[in-house]
Amino acid sequence: MQKIIDAHIHLSERRDDALIRFARMNDLRYTLDELMSTMRGLGVERGLLLSPPIQGATILPNDEIITLCKRSGGKLAPVITVEPTTREVKAAIKLADENKGEVKAFKVRLGYVKAGAESPVFSALYDYAESNRLPVLFHTGDTAFSTGDLARAHPLTLDSLANKREELTIILCHFGNPWFADTAELIYKHPRVYADISGLATGGGSYAEKYSDWLAKKISEAIYFAGDAEKVIFGTDYPVTKHSDALALVKKLDVDEPDKEKILSKNAQRVFSL
């Protein structure tokens, strides 16, 4: 069975988790037991766990993500989500320092917070990430809620940051959907810019299959443009997208099998030191 690493998972045990509606849409229980069972059944060896949004425009506290990862028996590794305040940045760096070797990346919720990628408030975070070789994930593209700020979430907002921070490893979450061509240019242009394919397929409806075909075509074309699949990372965005749907999308990609292996595990293994 092909080795798989899921580089974008959400989970909590709170009733005010804003992603519960997606779990219900996908007929998921959205529990740690369900997630572990699914990973075992599909051969997902490791996963990166990120804070889900909590109703009221906040996030699950990062220490709860650390706890959930410890309960996973080594299957899950934490990604620390960083909100745009000096206090939160300092707290994120402190937590990462206390859990060195376990924390694999940081996450910035572009489009959901009132700050852009180049906001000075993140400078200390980027310094720490560079010196410790920890990637920073950025939400890019469509937002899960209608109040999201697409101007801040557009993938091209990361171009200037990548120009100024050549040692910073940047991951564009959700492949900048629907700006696939812009994301393709960024991963082609910048040596340390990558993109994950999480959270792209969700829900049903009469056009679900055609939409999945469209996604596969766009991602395949982006890989052709970039010249290889070295910069594309598998992720589900569980519970927004089911593992079965995310894996079906990879299967549809019109690329060579060795490139699918890179997408499913090898790229994440290298980038996140898994």
Image (cartoon, rainbow, N blue to C red):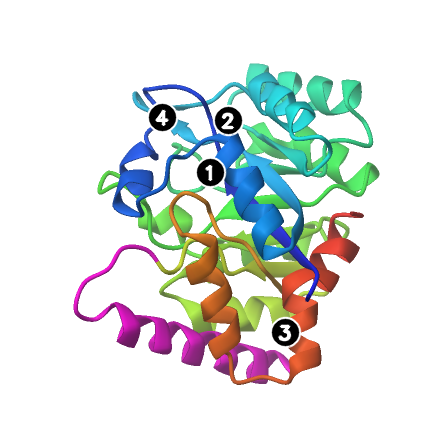
How packed is label 3: few (under 14 Cα within 10 Å), some, or many (20 or more)? many
For the residue pair 177 and 8, the one nearer the viewer reads as 8
Q: CA distance from mark 2 to mark 3?
A: 33 Å
Secondary structure predominantly adopted by residues drawn in magenta: helix
**Mark before the other along the chain sequence, 2 or 3:** 2
Q: Are marks 1 and 2 in contact (CB under 8 Å)?
A: yes
How packed is label 2: few (under 14 Cα within 10 Å), some, or many (20 or more)? many
For the residue pair 175 and 161, the one nearer the viewer reads as 175
Q: CA distance from mark 3 to mark 4?
A: 33 Å
* 148 relative to 182 in the view: left or right: left
Query: Residue under circle 3?
Result: 260
**In the rendering, which numbered label is found on residue 17?**
4
- State the image coordinates of residue 34 (x, y, percent, origin top left): 48, 37
For the residue pair 49 and 126, the one nearer the viewer reads as 49
**Mark before the other along the chain sequence, 4 or 1:** 4
**Mark before the other along the chain sequence, 3 or 4:** 4
* 38 relative to 21 in the view: left or right: right
Q: Nearer the viewer, mark 4 or mark 2?
A: 4
* 245 relative to 125 in the view: left or right: left
What amino acid is found at the position of numbered circle 3 in the picture? Answer: Lys
